[in-house]
Amino acid sequence: MVESLGIKRIEAIHYYVHDLERSRAFYTKKLDFAEIGQSSKALEEAGKQRSLLFRAGDVNVLVSAPLGEGGRAWRWLKRHPDGVGSIVFEVEDIEKTFRLLDARGGTPMQEIETYEDGGGTLRTFSITTPFGSSTFRFVQRDEAYPRLVPGFEEHETPKGGDNAYGFDHIDHITSNFETMSPALLWMEHVMGFERYWDIEFHTNDVAPDRPEGSGLRSQVMWDPKSGVKFANNEPLRPFFKKSQIYLFAEDQRGDGIQHAALAVNAIQKAVRGLRERGVDFFPTPGVYYDMLPARLEELEIGAIDEDMDELRELQILVDGKGKNSYLLQIFLQDSASTHDEREAGPFFFEIIERKGDKGFGGGNFRALFESIERQQKAEGRI
């Protein structure tokens, strides 16, 4: 068994955008995140970007937009649309994490950097990854360190929302690749992750003679100690270039992070509230719910706590395996559709409530895939 890096959790995602005010409105007014703080003038001058930090529960989203040329946000947006440029992990022992990654062929971008503030210490470094242009950052801080991000000015009282929808933590990250084997090998041999779950399917499985379709092969990797999970997808033949995974790569202009799943404890309340605020989700056809009782029986789940009519109304998906072991999930529209602008990017959020099931909604992959496929057909892309 490979020695653990000592990851404790996914602490944050770092998102690069063209329009910071649009992001502020989306997170605080739509998702009811709190705005925790903003970059200091000194940090903005040094990094040539302006940043805001949003939080709901244990979910932190750091959003940055360029100030002129030369900064990290500017370099990202020269190559890609808006998207997740970095995943931040909190670790137990930064020296150990650095040593293990360096010895396993990881590519640190700098030595460990140390920041001191308020009598506390934060230490951090970043590595490159096979996730397109996205990097991984590792952070260790002691309890006395007063802020999440060095150089940030946190508001005395958080602004914006107060997490009315109960977002708790990041359940998993999903990424798309034109070929995922290099990323899987890197996660196994460099990150020390293990294979957890896999699936492959094609939309023409149920109609082999159809002249088009969209397929994927997916493999989930996880860090057993922390429970951190990464789902990884690649297109599946036939119609390889019609796969939504391939189209993601065209929109992203490379491989990258497709979505982050946010865990909640009351998904129906969350979805109803979000819809009332104008948040859009990928639609699910009524036939999915017509077939749901038979699917639940086939999966041996038995009775579920939720009302079927309400699930149909809210278009929440259900999957699982075994008695009283299931999950509920739904997917927000991607940012490009949400903001009606292609350069807003193909990233989106998933909302998930787990009720005993630790899987990834394999039975729902097809429903999501077909929903995205219908949207891409409506746009004339396939």
Image (cartoon, grey):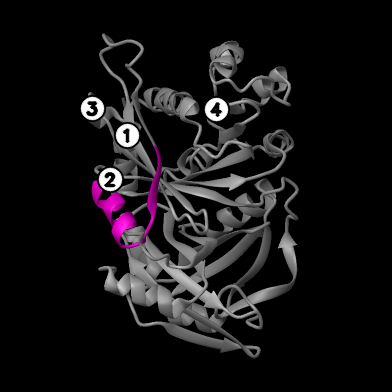
Q: Are marks 3 and 4 in contact (CB under 8 Å)?
A: no
Residue kind at label 2, given as amino acid type = Met
Label 2 and label 3: CA atoms lie apart by 14 Å
The residue drawn where x is 63% and y is 76% is 147
Label 3 and label 1: CA atoms lie apart by 10 Å
In magenta, the rendered stretch is 181-197
* Element carrying mark 4: loop
The residue drawn where x is 45% and y is 43% is 341
* Relative vertical location of residue 314 with respect to residue 346 in this rendering, above or below: above
- Whether residue 239 is visible to the viewer of this picture, yes or no, is yes
Label 2 and label 1: CA atoms lie apart by 9 Å
Residue kind at label 4, given as amino acid type = Lys
Residue under numbered circle 1? 217
Residue kind at label 1, given as amino acid type = Arg
Residue 27 image position (x, y, % from top left): 62, 52
Q: Are marks 2 and 1 in contact (CB under 8 Å)?
A: yes
Label 3 and label 4: CA atoms lie apart by 28 Å
Label 2 and label 4: CA atoms lie apart by 27 Å
Q: Is residue 272 left or right of residue 38?
A: right
- Whether residue 73 is visible to the viewer of this picture, yes or no, is no
Residue under numbered circle 4? 321
The residue drawn where x is 65% and y is 20% is 302
Q: Which mark is residue 180?
A: 2
Question: Mark 2 or mark 1, which has the lower sequence index?
Answer: 2
The residue drawn where x is 49% and y is 54% is 228
* Element carrying mark 3: loop
Residue under numbered circle 3? 237
Residue kind at label 3, given as amino acid type = Arg
* Relative vertical location of residue 156 with respect to residue 115 in this rendering, above or below: above
